[in-house]
Amino acid sequence: MSTYSVVMNKSRWARMLYQIERNADLTNGVFFDLGDYADSPDNFVENDGVIEIKSVTAAVHFETLKRGPFDPAYK
């Protein structure tokens, strides 16, 4: 199985778990081009939110858990 296949499979599971835990309806996201800014969320959450799913390797996830809730680069 390729790395791409593993990541896509994790993303599908993450999406399903999010839907179940939050009892939320998700629809596929689209690409927004607003000139100086563009975005492509993975999914829309009902009528008022978006979700972006990241599937990292086990090693990266473990380092994140040891360090704290998020990478300081994202502050």
Image (cartoon, rainbow, N blue to C red):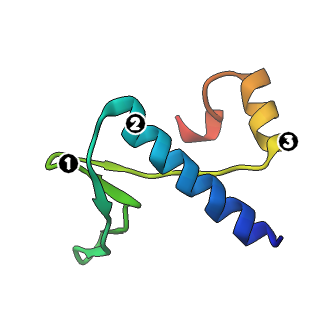
Residue that numbered label 1 is attached to: 46
N-terminal label among 2 and 3: 2
N-terminal label among 2 and 1: 2
Are dots 2 and 3 in contact, CB under 8 Å? no
Image position, residue 70 (x, y; %): 61, 31
Which amino acid type corresponds to the residue marked 1 in the rendered image? Glu
Image position, residue 67 (x, y; %): 75, 24
Q: Is residue 18 above or below residue 2?
A: above
Residue that numbered label 2 is attached to: 20
Tell me the element at label 3.
Answer: helix
From the viewer's side, name the closer residue of 3 and 19.
Answer: 19
Q: Nearer the viewer, mark 2 or mark 3?
A: 2
Counting other residues with Cα less than 10 Å from the Cα at mark 1, is it few (<14), some (14-19), or many (20 or more)?
few
Q: Is residue 59 above or below residue 63?
A: below
Q: CA distance from mark 2 to mark 1?
A: 13 Å
Point 32% across, 75% down: residue: 31
Please tell me in which quadrant of the rendered image residue 35 appears.
Answer: bottom left
Judged left or right of residue 42, residue 55 is right
Counting other residues with Cα less than 10 Å from the Cα at mark 3, is it few (<14), some (14-19), or many (20 or more)?
few
Q: Is residue 68 above or below residue 2?
A: above
Which amino acid type corresponds to the residue marked 2 in the rendered image? Ile
Are dots 2 and 1 in contact, CB under 8 Å? no
Residue that numbered label 3 is attached to: 59
Q: Nearer the viewer, mark 1 or mark 3?
A: 1
Quadrant the N terminus occupies: bottom right
Point 37% across, 67% down: residue: 40
Image position, residue 50 (x, y; %): 30, 50
Point 51% across, 51% down: residue: 53
Q: CA distance from mark 2 to mark 3?
A: 27 Å
Tell me the element at label 1.
Answer: loop
Count of numbered circles on the image? 3
